[in-house]
Amino acid sequence: MTTTTRSLVVVTAGLSEPSSSLLLGDRLAAAVERHLRESGLEPRVEVIELRAHAVDLANQMLTGFPSPSLQSALDAASAADGVIAISPIFSGSYNGLFKSFWDAVDRDSFRAKPVLIAATGGSPRHSLAVEHAIRPLFAYLRAAVVPTGVYAATEDWGQGGLATDGSLVERIDRAAAELAVAMAARRSAGPQDAYADPTPFEDLLRR
Amino acid sequence: MQFGVFTVGDVTPDPTTGHTVSEEERIRIMVRVAVKAEEVGLDVFATGEHHNVPFVPSSPTTMLGYIAAKTSRLQLSTATTLITTNDPVKIAEDYAMLQHLADGRVDLMMGRGNMGPVYPWFGQDLRNAIPLAIENYDLLRRLWREDVVDWEGKFRTPLTGFTATPRPLDGVPPFVWHGSIRSPEIAEQAAYYGDGFFHNNIFWPSSHVRRMVELYRRRFEHYGHGPADQAIVGLGGHVFMRKNSQDAIREFRPYFDKAPVYGGAMPLEDYMAQTPMTIGSPQQVIDRTLSFREFVGDYQRQLFIADHAGLPLTTVLEQMDILGAEVIPVLRREFEALRPANVPVGPPLHPRVAAAEATVAGSPAVLAETTA
């Protein structure tokens, strides 16, 4: 990868088709791409719809190992320069599908990774679930979550396309700009491979 | 190459009858499986060590000492010995004692256990699992190799002028394997000491097993124990056989569906496709097992799960008969034909066992048998 390329992975836990979570993810990704291009960077975007991995995630919980397609989704998220994570809000929090994916990722690969958190719901009354539920999950992963979390209630999709203060369009653009800045500053080191490059035993013995 | 069986010692209801054996019966079944292993011509029996229900084998050397008296040729081993929560001083003494009683037919495999609360129950902290495995094993090695040990570490009281007793048989410590499914530190540890590395090869796809074994082999060479292809590798495996593969699948499916380690997940067919598990005809088991060397290289020990998941003893013994009569003889011949001359034929044996084997192998009766 050249230093002018940035990989962006969108992870959405939307369940219905069409999905408003995927719709929000597409809008966020497009805005991040635009900001990256404005900074002279070439975005490379991959969208992971967790719905396709639902059965594999359940199997992984029981057997302990991921299927090949789930493994490639996990690898893509681990290797990304930036991640957009979106869940529908169920029962006041992210849904179970969303949580089961983040339970399966390699925590160390998320250290200081730029992440944009977002959620969708039927009512604006669940908007703080982004801050109270999703943000702490990524605090556990030690990710660098951008300040603006984006919540889109059903009624937000009827506001029109104007970037007026506080509108969904304005919040999408603000969050995307924050993620693009963080991704631009990130040096693409890639995750360390403990199998290719193990800690020498003398170091383990001295600990 | 050595072939054998390993057992976890679970007490699981038979899902086809609802019958659950008593602990006493389960322990007797484990012993019967070990004796049967020798009867059908297998080389190794290895027992797990657990300190939580529904498992019975909490005291491996007690069981292996009893089996030693009932067998004459079988190699006695573990899968695994808990190097984390056992005192390394007690491991050193228990297994040296077992060596004396079993005329050297002993090796053992280090592991870290499978259940978190066992650590606090034995006064340890799960978060120290890897550091415990490293410090305890380093002490264990010294206790077997040095007559008088002065030692100080983090996890047990210091030792001054301590001699583990009895000393290893003829001064030769048991060969040690290190078992790990996914911790690179353990592959690194096995490589550092030039010990064996064992992958259970049951729960994870072969692509992962390959990475662990590759790491071990590369680092074995790095630490100067010899070329990577001469490192000592062992694999587990899970098979169930009937003459007709559809019969094997039909008979085994209820056990798979309810087994504590697999149960309730994907269908048996998917699990077989994603892992090295083979349920089918003896020929399918032969073909699949021979294919293991394609992803780990030529290796020295193959263990199969025998008794588990509530399978009745009669079924387990039938499976071992098939292994001994139809599978292992072919595997021995095929693996031996494929093995390059510079690759060790098996793991290091105690000199007494090696001498006994050489005597038997050189006797006219056995030579006639192998050429027949």
Image: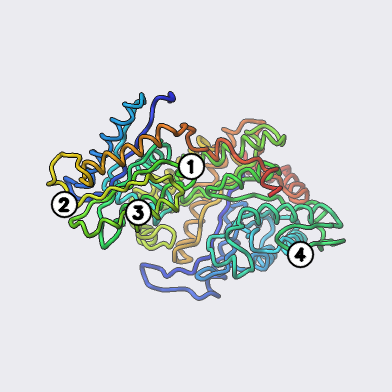
Which residue is label 3 attached to? A134
Asked if badges 4 and 2 are on one and the same chain, I answer no
For the point 54% across and 69% down, which residue is it? B52
Q: What is the C-alpha distance between the residues marked 3 and 2?
A: 19 Å
The extreme front residue here reads A165
Residue A132 seen in render: yes
Q: Position of residue B133 (x, y in %)?
A: 65, 54
Q: What is the C-alpha distance between the residues marked 3 and 1?
A: 31 Å
For label 3, the SS is: helix
Depth check: B187 or A120 in front?
A120
User: Which quadrant of the rendered structure holds the N terminus of chain B?
Assistant: top right
For label 1, the SS is: helix
Q: Nearer the viewer, mark 4 or mark 2?
A: 2
Q: What is the C-alpha distance between the residues marked 4 and 3?
A: 45 Å
Whether pointer 3 and pointer 1 mark residues with C-beta atoms closer than 8 Å, the reply is no
- Relative to B92, A190 lies left or right: left
Which residue is label 1 attached to? B208
For the point 16% across and 51% down, which residue is it? A154
User: Could you say which quadrant of the image residue B366 lies in?
Assistant: top right
Three-letter code for the amino acid on which mark 3 is drawn: Ile
Depth check: A11 or B268 in front?
A11
